[in-house]
Image (tube, rainbow, N blue to C red):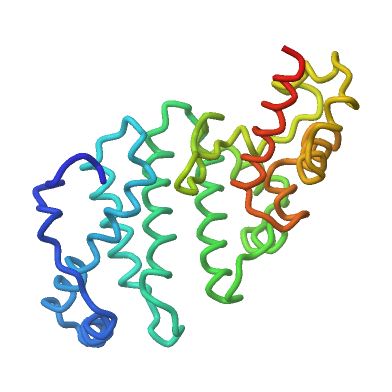
Amino acid sequence: MINKVEICGVNTAKLPVLSNKEKNELFIKIKEGDLEAREKFINGNLRLVLSILQRFSGRSDNMDDLFQVGCVGLIKAIDNFDMSLNVQFSTYAVPMIIGEIRRYLRDNNPIRVSRSIRDLAYKALQAKEKLTKELNKEPTIDQIAKEVGVEKEEVVFCFEAIQDPLSLQEPVFNDGAENLYIMDQVKDTKNTDERWADNITIEQAMKKLSEREKMIITKRFFDGRTQMEVADEIGISQAQVSRLEKNAIGRIKKLYK
């Protein structure tokens, strides 16, 4: 989890787990102003905050601080949740908790962003949340810009300015066998680790591959597609594309050692 049983004085091993029925019953009481039910509901959802913290466990930030910020997001979700939407509370709460943590990380980011850009970004994020609730789907950049009263280019710029920098080696998916990294999803038709292929008789090497391997190598290194794009086109998972790609490259390298 986060390498500790206790966080912010809370013993994570003893946190309660609420059933959906219990959550619904407590939420009705919360809406009626029952503070005891509110506290029980919060405690019963702290495991949700902990599960989200795992996404940020590789950072140097203090996990106690992030847990407290995540709890703020949880409380905001409780205050704004509408039972008539007919969705699970966790479905509604997760993006709010993540958003609260990310806002905290942006404010404490060593890469400084000007106050005006940050303020515009917050307004745009608030507009995005408002429009999402109204439209029941994620709004477009044009809709957000119109709601805030600025040009869409300004919205795009401010969103990009407040994004946390990511390492190309950061894992984005694990299928139980191997990790897929951000660099596996980056399209680059010019500078790739496989430029050695330009200097060998590629046609002869490709003949040694299966039809599916040929297709993947062609799409990846000649058409410049990402693994995700290839996976969507041929109807298999990205993990399978990654394995087939690595196997094909390994076989070609062995032929020319």
**Where, quadrant-wise, is the C terminus in this rendering?**
top right
Residue 183 place in picture, x, y as percent: 61, 32
Which residue: 41% across, 46% down? 103
Q: Residue at x 82, y 44 (%)?
A: 211
Image spot of residue 97 (x, y percent): 37, 57
Task: Tell me if residue 116 can be seen.
Answer: no
Does residue 89 lie above or below 84 as drawn?
Answer: above
* Residue 171 in the image, given as x and y percentages of width and height: 49, 38
Number of dots carrying numbers: 0
Query: Is 195 placed above or below 61 here?
Result: above
- At a point 15% along the width and 54% down the height, the residue shown is 12
Q: Front-most of 16 and 60? A: 16
Up-down relation of residue 6 to residue 115 (above or below): below
Q: Which quadrant of the view contains residue 256?
A: top right
| Side (left or right) of 204 relative to 90 | right
**What residue lies at 30% left-to-right and 53% top-to-bottom?**
70
**Closer-to-camera residue (204/219):** 204
- When asked about the image quadrant of residue 159, the answer is top right
- Residue 26 visible in the snapshot: yes
What is the quadrant of residue 144 in the picture? bottom right
Q: Position of residue 50 (x, y in %)?
A: 27, 53
148 and 41: which one is in front? 41
Q: Say whether residue 41 is left or right of residue 233.
A: left
